Image (spheres, rainbow, N blue to C red):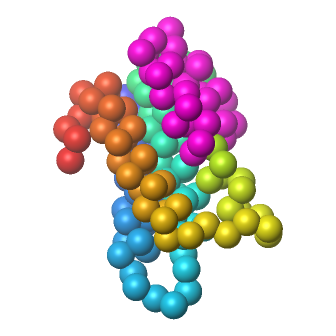
Amino acid sequence: MKTETEEWISRAEEDLSAATDLFRLRTRQSRANVICFLCQQTAEKYLKARMAEAGLEIPRVHDLVLLMQRLLPVEPLWDSFAPVLRDMNHYAVKFRYPGHIATRADARIALKTCRSIRAEFRHSLGLPKK
């Protein structure tokens, strides 16, 4: 596995670990906004890891659907992830600005979705699901 791929994976795992730890905290202050954002970031970094491993140019964008589309020549079945990734794109923006507040339920869904697609991304990279 390429060094760059490993670095993307490491950063993705850091984001997922932080999101999971924050979700487990039972505090009065909601951290759902951050959890949702970190889940989007996890997916983004796994997509970029797969791009690195395939030798594709990695654009400095955060659009998960665009990243997935660039991977279709390598992973044609990933087109089925488009609806889920489109939904996850909202986590990068919607809850980062005033006017929208993520709920604990949103955070739960974000984590579940993130873990689900992460398993497929890891499988594609020849890694265990963990």
Task: Decide: is 96 above or below 39.
Answer: below
Residue at left 20%, top 38%?
A: 128
Residue 93's spot in the image, x, y percent? 71, 53
Q: Quarter of the image holding residue 4?
A: top left
Q: Horizontal placement of 39 versus 3: left or right?
A: right
Check residue 42 for magenta coloring.
no
Q: Horizontal placement of 35 versus 5: left or right?
A: right
What secondary structure is the stretch in magenta mostly built from? helix
Task: Decide: is 68 above or below 30.
Answer: above
Q: Which residues are magenta?
A: 59-88
Q: Is residue 16 visible?
A: yes
Q: Quadrant of the N terminus?
A: top left
Q: Residue furthest top?
A: 73
Q: Is residue 4 visible?
A: no
Q: Residue furthest bottom?
A: 28
Q: Nearer the viewer, residue 12 or 106?
A: 106
Residue 112's spot in the image, x, y percent? 38, 52
Check residue 84 for magenta coloring.
yes
Residue at left 59%, top 19%?
A: 70
